[in-house]
Image (cartoon, rainbow, N blue to C red):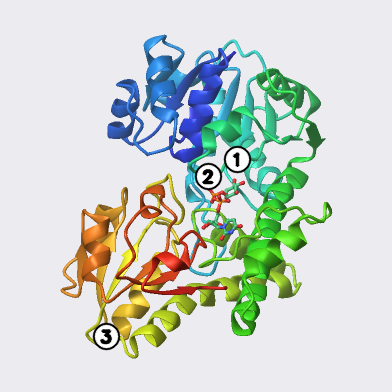
Amino acid sequence: MNNCVVGTGYVGLVTGVCLAEKNNVVTCVDVIEEKVDMIKKGKPPIYEKNLQPLLEKNVKNKRLLATTNLGKAMEKTDIIFICVGTPSKEDGAIDLRHVENAVKNIGKNLANLEETDYPVVVVKSTVVPGTTEKIVIPTLEKHSGKKAGKDFGVCMNPEFLREGDAVKDFLNPDRIVIGEHDEKGGDKLDRVYSWSKAPRIRCTPTTAEMIKYASNALLATKISFINEIGNQCKTLGIDVYDVARGVGLDHRISPHFLQAGPGFGGSCFPKDVKALAKQAEELGLQPLLLKAVLEVNRRQPLKAVDLVEKMLGQLEDRTVTILGLTFKPDTDDTRESPAIPIIKKLLERGANVILHDPKAGEKVKKLFYGDKKVEIFEDPQKAVDLGDATILVTAWREYLTLDYSKTRLVDTRHVIDREKCLEYEGICW
Ligand code: UDX
């Protein structure tokens, strides 16, 4: 099939590369020329494990193309995937600007298509329930002068990709959700995934949108839940990881997403839970549970600061090393990373901060640019040795083998043996 992917962020690029790997010809479209140029050269503009070799291979064999020209990309396309970002607005609602813009341009180009073989427009961007039906379809119809379900198909097909494992997740999905406005469009989208035996959920676009939000909200709830239990465990001298093992072996619960720590970050969980809660409020409902999930998560990283302050007696003019700035290992993404509120709180309490991250040092440097109390180190061992205490925020592999024998360590990830440290505190154990 010929596919076209609009937006070349994490989701768009992974979708494009993986579909090319599955023998489709895919054209990636982006408004940013530099990104398109990089993709054409086989270089991913973002860091994602295993993406680079697949991108290079499929650019070389001409299954993956890139352009800024949407009209050209759509000339022979069977399916157009919308993978642009949906950032948070101040009030927690999602900002649909990029989606609306992409949909408008896709609509205009649908109008120009002379020989159409029922192109299908697929929303992959995460959008609140109702968006495809109420905004995407009317906008496509308005700008194309054509009718959804008659001249072109529309589907909502959420992604469940974890950063760092996105390629693996795309190629081995647990399920494929096809929210179809029309059956013909749904059938065509289904054929794109013919290589996967994963169960299909054929439903309405609005149901598909809610499946995505409900999945992320439930996973985020598990994390805030285990963190709250963990905080109680810490007070009682219990290791919450022993508790989570005992709980997770119940097949109704499962052991996944019960790792207590500094709270969830990243581009999805915080944004999606906020957007779902905001929609509930707009509907006149009270999202009590979702609000609690967010509040537990807001407070959780600050526990690490309290622990390090207790260790050192006070933070004024003491130096605290932060190991890990990304929201999890194997990514360069610092969005909503728990490291950020931890650093801010340390500075607020008068500490000097040394930062280390194998991938994201430069990104965070920009955030604290000019702050004399913040230093970035290249060598993690030096960073640890020069701090009065260290907080391990991200479980990068290279941190597991450092020498902590002279270190006062707050471990937020349950990855360091306490016997190996001068002094040790776990965040929930
Ligand atoms: C998540 C979802 O997993 C994915 O399905 C969705 O499409 C996008 O959002 P991602 O944000 O890449 O993916 O990361 P994930 O691995 O799920 O972790 C999210 C956050 O939760 C991280 O900050 C992680 O450290 C934290 N986490 C995860 C915990 O604190 N405890 C856990 O047990 C699991």
What quarter of the picture does the N terminus occupy?
Answer: top right
Q: Which mark is residue 100?
A: 2
What quarter of the picture does the C terminus occupy?
Answer: bottom right
| Residue that carries the numbered disc 3 in the rendered image | 350
* Residue 28 picture quarter: top left
Q: Is residue 14 left or right of residue 260?
A: left
Q: In this view, does 281 lie above or below 362?
A: below
Residue drawn at the location 68% of the way across and 22% of the way down: 193
Q: Is residue 368 visible?
A: no
| Mark 1 residue element | helix
Q: Is residue 369 above or below residue 59?
A: below
| Residue that carries the numbered disc 1 in the rendered image | 139
Front residue (pair 291, 429): 429
Q: How far apart are marks 1 and 2 (CA)?
A: 8 Å
Q: Distance between the residues labelled 2 and 3?
A: 45 Å
Neighbours of disc 1 within 10 Å: few (<14), some (14-19), many (20+): many
Neighbours of disc 2 within 10 Å: few (<14), some (14-19), many (20+): some
* Residue 114 picture quarter: top right
Neighbours of disc 3 within 10 Å: few (<14), some (14-19), many (20+): some
Sequence order check: which comes first, mark 3 or mark 1? Answer: 1
Q: Which amino acid does label 2 sit on?
A: Glu
CB under 8 Å between callouts 3 and 1?
Answer: no
Q: Which amino acid does label 1 sit on?
A: Thr
Residue 211 place in picture, x, y as percent? 73, 48
Q: Which amino acid does label 3 sit on?
A: Gly
| Mark 3 residue element | loop
Residue 347 place in picture, x, y as percent? 29, 79
CB under 8 Å between callouts 1 and 2?
Answer: yes
